[in-house]
Amino acid sequence: MSELLARHRAVMPSWLALYYDEPVEITGGKGVRLTDADGNTYLDFFAGILTNMLGYDVAEVREAVERQIATGVVHTSTLYLLRGQVELAEKIARLSGIPDAKVFFTNSGTEANETALLLATCARGSDQVLAMRNSYHGRSYGTVAVTGNRGWKNSALSPLNVHYLHGTDRDAAAFRGMSDDRYIDACVADLRDVLATATAREVACLIAEPVQGVGGFTMPPPGLFAAYKEVLDEEGVLFVSDEVQTGWGRTGTGFWGISEHGVAPDAITFAKGLGNGFAVGGVVARGDLMDGLTANGVSTFGGNPVAMAAANATLDYVLDHDLQANAARLGPIVLDGLRPLTGLAAVGAVRGKGLMYAVDMVDPGTGAPSPQLASAVLEAARRRGLLIGKGGLRGNVLRAAPPLTVGEADVREARDILVDAVTEVDAQAR
Ligand code: PLP
């Protein structure tokens, strides 16, 4: 064990996730490549868990942040007018597609979702919330409550009355083999059933990720959320789209993950990529919902000038360079290369959308999800110079999501490394 790892283990929580048998200490980054303390370089296809949306050491972001720091004002709280904050809010409100939208900035996705839950439960005067099975929404009390993934749930106690919907578990026996349309019908029937049987009136909201991130990049069929929304609207239930992983063009099918479903949510939560590594999150919601809170509020650091400088520069870059189009163009190159992996006994499925793609690792004998094989592929990819992620309810899903600025050569290189790593692990597992 390295000296730093021993010190980490001594003072940091045992549950704090660390990748790799020999965890990596990152010491530098440029573009889509990282360097570690031993001088190894890697293609980074997890991008700081989808935070480094433009990659590392991006001049436009660095210079914007340096300009802000040079003013002497790193932070003054949001008790004063902050130009960068207003400008960013205007852009996000416009991009949200939500009528009369207003924006509140936080420091993380967890706080963003906590705020959205507060808006919805206050607006509806109800602690009843719908969430999706297999979801992940954060690590606070309220967001753990709406998380439908046992691996991330620490508490059986809940401040909310949560009911979980189908909609992302297409491999479950009841849904296997269904066409998209039949699956959507079955999920809508499930929603109606939950509303009619398990809830009292005045359900506050449904919170859902358009593509589940931590859940293993599960991809509901396009149109599912529009079908849900019709039912939700009948009862005035609000819809919160958690875009912490899927926002800003990542899926290639629209600016938000929800875009391809053809429905406007009542609120969108965001974080991760917006600051290109600087901590910034927030909620954009219908103005009446946002203004519906009755108590004063402030987030001490939320919307601070440095984060806003980073976020404005990042968002401008995304729009100026049409990175959504880049995700749409490069996604199929990866996916087409990965698809043949489904012929291997240790691979259960391959899927992707834009610059998010996943490979499910299974036991070659039983077909059961295999977190061990997923970890083995992570190690094998790392040895070949590629960093990716893993996830999924059972920990068996390999996840890749590079910076949106990635080029075609890097995408091909990473795809080929991943194919080699999976093939090697499959051969060893037989
Ligand atoms: N929502 C989603 C969809 C996420 O993937 C995450 C983090 O992975 C969160 C919320 C929580 O964000 P944060 O870790 O910034 O609190």
Image (cartoon, rainbow, N blue to C red):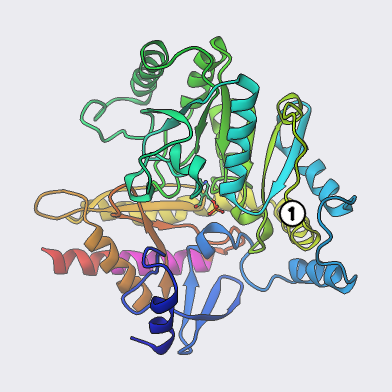
User: Between 381 and 268, which is closer to the camera in this rendering?
Assistant: 268
Kindly identify the residue that appears in the image at 39 percent across and 39 percent down.
157
- Report the amino acid beneath label 1: Thr
Q: Percent position (x, y) of residue 184? A: 39, 22
User: Between 266 and 256, which is closer to the camera in this rendering?
Assistant: 266
Q: Quadrant of residue 301?
A: bottom right
User: In the image, is 270 to the left or to the right of 295?
Assistant: left
User: In the image, is 348 to the left or to the right of 384?
Assistant: left
Quarter holding the N terminus is bottom left
Q: Percent position (x, y) of residue 161? A: 44, 27
Instruction: Considering the whole magenta stretch, tell me its main secondary structure.
Output: helix
Q: Quadrant of residue 308?
A: bottom right
Any part of residue 51 in sight: yes
Q: Which residue is mark 1?
A: 300
User: Can you tell me whether the CB of the residue at mark 1 lies under 8 Å from the nearest atom of ligand 1?
Assistant: no
Could you tell me which secondary element the residue under label 1 belongs to? loop
User: How packed is label 1: few (under 14 Cα within 10 Å), some, or many (20 or more)?
Assistant: some
Q: Is 210 located above or below residue 84 in the figure?
A: above
**Magenta-highlighted residues:** 409-421
Kindly identify the residue that appears in the image at 37 percent across and 49 percent down.
154
Kindly identify the residue that appears in the image at 62 percent across and 44 percent down.
112
User: In the image, is 127 to the left or to the right of 418?
Assistant: right
